[in-house]
Amino acid sequence: MNPTDPNSPRIGRQLDTNTRSRLVSYLIRRGHDNANQAVDAAEDFLHAAAASSQPLTPTPLADIGWHAFILHTADYAAFCQRLAGRFIHHVPHQGADCESHCNSCDARKADG
């Protein structure tokens, strides 16, 4: 099982129903047709990040859900504490990878 792969079997869910609904609604209001999948992918990624001693990079789908979750700061901080016993920080891309990531994000925005 690869917890950062949205097609992998689902791991145990710890995200409460109310928070999940708020995140999905938030993404739908912003035009994301894949809101449910993005929230699932973000949760899977956070499970992997909590268990890893190395920095991980989310899939583009997980990153969409993660960004939405981070904006709901109280919910995100509480989830991280329950899951990992610590806050899981988001560290943006740096260096050459940043340029290609930012260009890819810009292209997705231009496509609608």
Image (cartoon, rainbow, N blue to C red):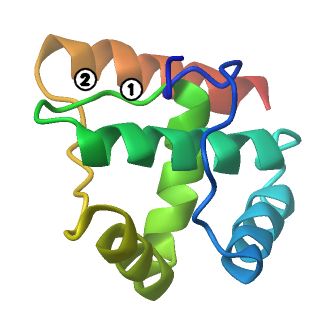
User: In which quadrant of the rendered image does the C terminus lie?
Assistant: top right
Q: Is residue 2 above or below residue 26?
A: above
Position of 78 compared to 14: left or right? left
Q: In percent of the image, x 88 and y 41: which residue is there?
A: 33
Residue annotated with mark 2: 98
Instruction: Locate residue 92, reporting x and y percent.
Output: 24, 40
Q: How many marks?
A: 2
Three-letter code, disc 1: Cys
Which dot marks residue 40? none
Quarter residue 61 falls in: top right
Callout 2 environment at 10 Å: few (<14), some (14 to 19), or many (20+)?
A: few
Q: Secondary structure at mark 2?
A: helix
Position of 56 compared to 23: left or right? left
Callout 1 environment at 10 Å: few (<14), some (14 to 19), or many (20+)?
A: few
Q: In percent of the image, x 54 and y 17: which residue is there?
A: 1
Estimate the spatial distance between the alpha carbons at disc 1 and disc 2, rounded to whole Å. Answer: 6 Å
The front one of 13 and 80 is 13
Q: Is residue 19 above or below residue 9?
A: below
Q: Is residue 3 above or below residue 74?
A: above
Residue annotated with mark 1: 102
